[in-house]
Image (cartoon, rainbow, N blue to C red):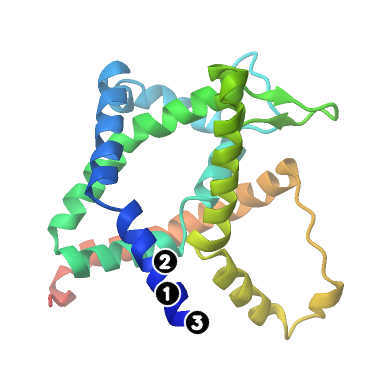
Amino acid sequence: MWSVINDFLVNVDNFVWGVPLMVLIMAGGLLLTVRLGLLQIRKLPLALKWMIQNEEEAEGEISSFAALCTALSATIGTGNIVGVATAVCAGGPGALFWMVAAAFLGMATKYSEGLLAVKYRVVAPDGHSLGGPFYYIEQGMGKNWKWLAKLFAFFGVCVGLFGIGTFSQVNGIASAINGFFDPDNAHCVSRIDRRCKTDRKCEPDCCTIYGDPLFCFCRYPDHLQYY
């Protein structure tokens, strides 16, 4: 049974993450980069300014720095480390160039997604902001595209559960904390403001630790081994 499931996932992975999708992602990022006038470089000083300082007359539940830390907490992880190592081993050093190019063009894509999420976000009765692709698809493209928003939400749940290692991560966390307290009596309730307070304190240290290997590579280049 497991071999059948593995073959199915391999076939789906080969179909989805093929050359057409890679071209579509890069072309979309290039189009947005041109249409936004090289926003990644042109607005970088402004982005660095508002990274630690809240905008004047801006509305939101959290500060700019807390929002940055929350975004980093969902971006920097084991996937970056393992994914880069796997890409270099499988495709050689040239894979680094394409990862840098995709990341540069992806800045424009990420900005566009964030802009649409803020523009078409809705405020719940309790005062919390709700947004995301399924909201701006419905709010921006019209009610006739509500089916696409639901489809995106469905596949988003599937990717979150099966595609990015949620089950394995939860299993690893559960195994690690099982010796500290009874997991049957543990409850996890997360709100955006509480999560951002935690991320704001933890992420600077995580980024520092994340960058330590780069310092070692630059400080001791003679100790590197090439295979």
Residue shown at 36%/34% (left/top)?
107
Image-based side of 63 in relation to 191, left or right: left
Where's residue 207, x and y in %? 46, 54
Q: Nearer the viewer, mark 3 or mark 1?
A: 3
Q: Which residue is mark 3?
A: 1
Q: Nearer the viewer, mark 3 or mark 2?
A: 3
Q: Which residue is mark 1?
A: 6
Nearest to N terminus: mark 3 or mark 2: 3
Q: Quadrant of the C terminus?
A: bottom left
Where's residue 29, x and y in %? 30, 32
Nearest to N terminus: mark 3 or mark 1: 3
Residue shown at 44%/57% (left/top)?
208
In the rendered image of this protein, does residue 133 appear above or below residue 80?
above
Image-based side of 28 in relation to 111, left or right: left
Whether the residues at callouts 3 and 1 have beta carbons within 8 Å, the answer is no
Q: Disc 2 on helix, strand or loop?
A: helix
Q: Disc 1 on helix, strand or loop?
A: helix
Q: Which amino acid, by three-letter code, is at mark 1? A: Asn
Residue 179's image quarter? Answer: bottom right
Query: CA separation, marks 3 and 1?
Result: 9 Å
In the rendered image of this protein, does residue 115 appear above or below residue 62?
above
191 and 215: which is toward the camera = 191
Q: Which amino acid, by three-letter code, is at mark 3? A: Met
Q: Disc 3 on helix, strand or loop?
A: loop
Q: Which residue is mark 2?
A: 9
Where's residue 44, x and y in %? 36, 27
48 and 62: which is toward the camera = 62
Query: Farthest residue toward the bottom?
Result: 179
Query: Farthest residue toward the top?
Result: 57
Query: CA separation, marks 3 and 2?
Result: 13 Å
